[in-house]
Image: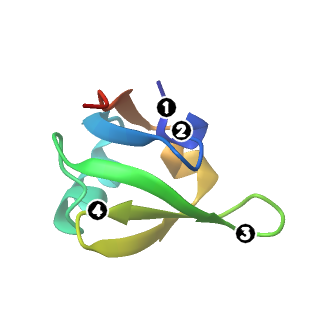
Amino acid sequence: MKLSSLTFNQIGIVKAVHGDDLSLKLFEMGLLPGEEVALENVAPFGDPIAIRVGEYKMCIRLNDAEQIEVSLKESN
């Protein structure tokens, strides 16, 4: 599933980031495979979105979120 498809109560685990330039930029910012991500906020017109990655919040464009593959975290 794509990161852009997460809803507010879902937690995803990053599986892959597609696109060489985008993946390098996001890896440098701490968005690595295996990291937990959660949707925090959506701008009034739906773009950009704010996600929680670890202990901080990151804003990304919806087009970039389409390039990030996540799997849903299993609830305990």
Q: Residue type at mark 1?
A: Lys
Task: Tell me which amino acid carries mark 3.
Answer: Ala
The quadrant in which the C terminus is found is top left
Q: Position of residue 4 (x, y in %)?
A: 57, 41
Q: Is residue 65 left or right of residue 71?
A: right
Question: Tag 2 or tag 3, which sits nearer the N-term?
Answer: 3
Q: Disc 2 and disc 1: Cα gap in Å?
A: 6 Å
Q: Which residue is mark 1?
A: 2
Q: Residues within 10 Å of mark 1 (few under 14, many from 20)?
A: some
Q: Residue 25: which numbered mark, if any?
A: 4
Furthest toward the right, the residue is 45
Query: How far apart are the alpha carbons under marks 4 and 3?
Result: 22 Å
Looking at the image, is mark 4 or mark 2 earlier in the sequence? Answer: 4
Residue 48: give x, y in percent of width and height: 64, 64
Under mark 4, the amino acid is: Lys
Say what secondary structure mark 1 lies in. loop
Kindly identify which residue carries mark 3. Answer: 43
First along the sequence among labels 4 and 3 = 4
Of the two numbered discs 1 and 4 on the same chain, state the one appearing first in sequence.
Answer: 1
Q: Are marks 4 and 3 in contact (CB under 8 Å)?
A: no
